Amino acid sequence: MQRPFSFETPNGQPIFSLEFFPPKDEKGEAHLWVELTELNSLHPEFVSVTYGAGGSTRERTVRITSEITARTGLRTVAHLTCIGSSKAELSEILDQYWSAGIRDILALRGDPPAGPQSEWIPTIGGFTHSDELVSLAVAANFNVGVAAFPDCHPASYGNYTEDVLVLLEKERRGAQFATTQFFFSADKYFNLVKELRERGSKLPIFAGILPITQVKQLSRMAQLGGTPIPPEIMKAFIEVENEPEKVKALGIEIAVNLCNELIAMGVPGLHFYTMNSAYATKEIVKRIGLR
Ligand SMILES: Cc1cc2nc3c(=O)[nH]c(=O)nc-3n(C[C@H](O)[C@H](O)[C@H](O)COP(=O)(O)OP(=O)(O)OC[C@H]3O[C@@H](n4cnc5c(N)ncnc54)[C@H](O)[C@@H]3O)c2cc1C
């Protein structure tokens, strides 16, 4: 079994990790290698690579994820979803990751094509919820992580307790960490942690941080991920939306403030959604004093 993450860091600082997505074409891939090399110099605890289901996308995802591990030697968490695969096919993908030296899986359900709140129809012979995928990956000896939602999962329609119970069930099945959807309120993150601890959970919850670099991207991602944007943040972005440099600076400032609040309150890990771009994440990591 893969070793769990170590939280023994100098000065008791949180660990940090970086998320990438598999690019769609060669140009995007060339860009990924440049940005990844730049970010690798920060020495993250691990990188994670998102999963795109379906035919050629799936093959490219597995290839690029495996290549990241081979090229960088970084500990790589491969995301895997239940979308479009039977249990046997999911086992095959896990085997491919294992052969590529990957020992960490983020086990997810995935979203229906029409969005997170639309009806979820499981693949024939596949899984209904991600907890079943957790069991499959744990049985295959992976160190397994899961998703968590400080603002509640969009399909839970505000039923926060249900989300907390779902996380407890995933931990019971062997999940060893959770990474959150991006969020803007440190209080919501700590509320989720508190609810879990009150029920006996020891699951480390890594806080997902999105450095916002474009206003258009913010609205789209918030809608998909079910993260409400506080009105004062939206207003601040709208005021500078036609000035790209100011948008980036504001996005960095908001992320730095959130990270500092989380660090002061003892977050064990910060997970940056890099969007395959080094600049903003590098700046934030430096400004919060992690490197
Ligand atoms: C950190 C992170 C990384 C992500 N990476 C990817 C990625 O790489 N690729 C991708 O396609 N998507 C990704 N997603 C999106 C994710 O797939 C969606 O948010 C999806 O809708 C939910 O995934 P889940 O694993 O939480 O699903 P589940 O745990 O299955 O939960 C989905 C819904 O079902 C409910 N539920 C869960 N288990 C049960 C149960 N046993 N009984 C009844 N109800 C239950 C939950 O409360 C929730 O409402 C990511 C999300 C996060 C937060």
Image: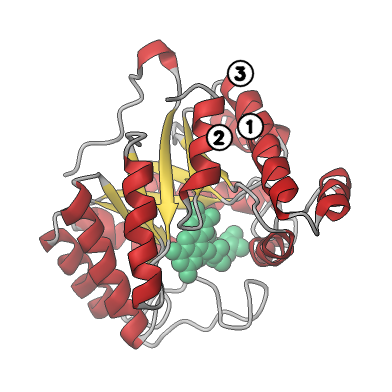
Which residue is rendered at x = 35% and y = 19% of the image? 9
As shown in the figure, which amino acid type bears the numbered disc 3? Ala
- Return the residue nearer the eye: 41 or 190: 41
How far apart in space, not on screen, are marks 3 and 2 (Cα)?
16 Å
Which residue is rendered at x = 16% and y = 67% of the image? 95
The quarter holding residue 220 reads bottom right
Q: Are marks 1 and 2 in contact (CB under 8 Å)?
A: yes
The residue wearing badge 3 is 264
Is 99 positioned to the left or the right of 24 in the image?
Answer: left
Q: First in sequence, mark 3 or 2: give its number.
A: 3
The residue wearing badge 2 is 284
From the image, which quarter does the N terminus lie in?
A: top left
Q: First in sequence, mark 1 or 3: give its number.
A: 1
From the image, which quarter does the C terminus lie in?
A: top left
As shown in the figure, which amino acid type bears the numbered disc 2? Ile
- Return the residue nearer the eye: 47 or 103: 47
Q: Position of residue 123 (x, y in %)?
A: 42, 85
Residue 115 sits above or below residue 167 on the image: below
